[in-house]
Image (cartoon, rainbow, N blue to C red):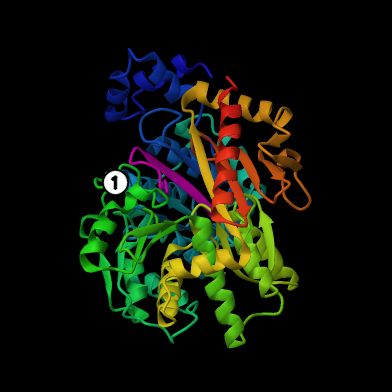
Amino acid sequence: MDYKKIYEEWLNNEFFDEKTRKELKAIENDEKEIEDRFYKNLEFGTAGLRGKLGAGTNRMNVYNVSKVTQGIADFIIEKGQEYMNRGVAIAYDCRHYSKEFAKTAALVLAGNGIKAYLFEDLRPTPELSYTVRSLETAAGIIITASHNPKEYNGYKVYWEDGAQVLSSIADPMTEKINAINSFKEVKTIDEKEASDKGLLVILGKDMDYEYIEKVKTLSIRDDIDKNIKVVYSPLNGTGNIPVRRVLSERGFSNIIVVPEQENPDPNFTTVEYPNPENTKAFEYAERLGKEVNAELLLATDPDCDRLAIEVRNSSGQYVPFNGNQTGAILIKYIVESMHEMGTLPENAAIIKSLVTGDLGRAIAKEYGVTTFEVLTGFKNIYGKAVELEKTGEYKFIFGYEESIGYNAGTFVRDKDAVCSAMLLCEAAAYYKTKGKTLLDVLNEIFEKHGYYKEKQISLVLEGVEGKARIDRMMETYRKDFPKQIGNLKMSRYIDYLKGYEDISPSNVLKFYLADGSWYAIRPSGTEPKIKVYIYTKGNTLEESNKNLEVIEEIVINNLNSIE
């Protein structure tokens, strides 16, 4: 792309509003910024769109949102009138321009004769997935950038099964989007006309009620201490109302919300990075937790599909759990409880991503539960769950990823922090009746199954040069990697670029070491990062930690040496 030419076109074309052109005028002397905004189109893929807000082809703005929506509309129109009538459900989170982008998408769909079901206000991502299935819409759209910084927004697409689109749908959608040569090809109508024609339907509290009632069906036990004291932070996102509501309706009477992070705030004023995976996000929760003597801290990300926890130890400090550890706790609670109550299916299965650790697998195996592995992303977890559902050979009971995403149901086909918050509070409240904290339970798991340790490292490489370097890193490392790390010899290497067994092709490398440790490398699909996942297993915590340090040092040094 001739980025300078495209920049000039946006700058001087009155089709673009005055605010957009003024923003572009302000960067006329910043060559690097112009290049970054216009060197490519913001890419639509199986993760949808995600990028920094601003004017430009490589930015999130109403023009790119309208173009992508037109392409999706063209795809739906090709499917026929039935799909057009079924329509598209649309939700949005608390970020800057989320409401505007959601309304833009709704009116483009309406302009193409496709019914749009638009939520009246912000809603969590899992509720959007549920809505697609409840209303039997053809598709769903959620405007969110998940846990990214405030400068970002995004656009995720779901298909009629309630899961994010897989490549079989995303690829032909992308073809339709790329076939649009001009923003002037986008069809739209105003809000009144859309409403008058019955092409714009506003969704409200009825859908909230339906969704919460469904979440409550996933509860497992009532022989628990519902007076357990929990501090919860929605991190100024969409989780505040649904998480508090489901916990209240389940009878938890001691849920205290972090006041500074209770209400929606697109600037995320109290946290630089609204990702509960980052322990800095728990600063306010920890402070409040110590004041009220809370036993458990919960935090959900802005669109409320991810959940992280911290647990109070014997000295009154809070210990953060990573996604693998929290997933292991949930698996133990769910599987153990089902087994005890006689409700565990004989053919039960859990599904995890291939960069998620194996501790959950070890717990599941103890109870005869099968573990399946898929590519990263809940779209793949539920793609496999639907496949299992169709064959009837296995019964899906839980899916999870190391990136703090979990779900135990099938009515939402994505990660669900509302459901996860309820089950984690249940687990903590149940083990409390046994005189144990979740930290005690985790240590018991380690003693029984071995000391599993893990670490994820992200090397951030932004811009044109960064993307090119990430590509070089992957290409070089897949050909020239260390055959031995410290005293650990490599036992197996899988390159998923051309697929592996029943796993689709993906740019992922996974290296197994002789002692059962392993590490994986992949570029992020949504952020300018190359990610390294390291997993070790030892007879002692010290052994596991030592091996993790050795693997990290050698792998990261190797990657950083690739210019």
Badge 1 element: loop
Q: Position of residue 300 (x, y in %)?
A: 38, 58
Say above or below: 222 vs 133.
below
Name which quarter of the figure residue 267 lies in. top left
Q: Residue at x 46, y 46 (%)?
A: 155
Say above or below: 75 vs 411.
above
**Viewer-nearest residue: 218 or 116:** 218
Describe residue 306's horizontal placement relative to residue 29 as left or right.
right
Picture mark count: 1
Q: Position of residue 7 (x, y in %)?
A: 41, 19
Amino acid under label 1?
Val
Query: Is 463 in the magenta?
Result: no
**Viewer-nearest residue: 403 or 181:** 403
**What is the residue that sits farthest to the right in this orientation?**
501
Q: Position of residue 563 (x, y in %)?
A: 57, 19
On the image, numbered disc 1 is attached to which residue?
Answer: 271
Describe residue 298's horizontal placement relative to residue 177 as left or right.
left
Q: Residue at x 55, y 41 (%)?
A: 549
**Viewer-nearest residue: 301 or 556:** 556
Q: Residue at x 37, y 45 (%)?
A: 101
Name which quarter of the figure residue 511 lies in. top right
Q: Position of residue 251 (x, y in %)?
A: 34, 82
Question: Where are the magenta residues, as a range?
Answer: 144-158
Describe residue 153's horizontal placement relative to residue 512 as left or right.
left
Q: Residue at x 56, y 71 (%)?
A: 332
In this orientation, does residue 118 appear? yes
**Viewer-nearest residue: 258 or 158:** 258
Say above or below: 67 vs 13.
below
Name which quarter of the figure residue 367 lies in. bottom right
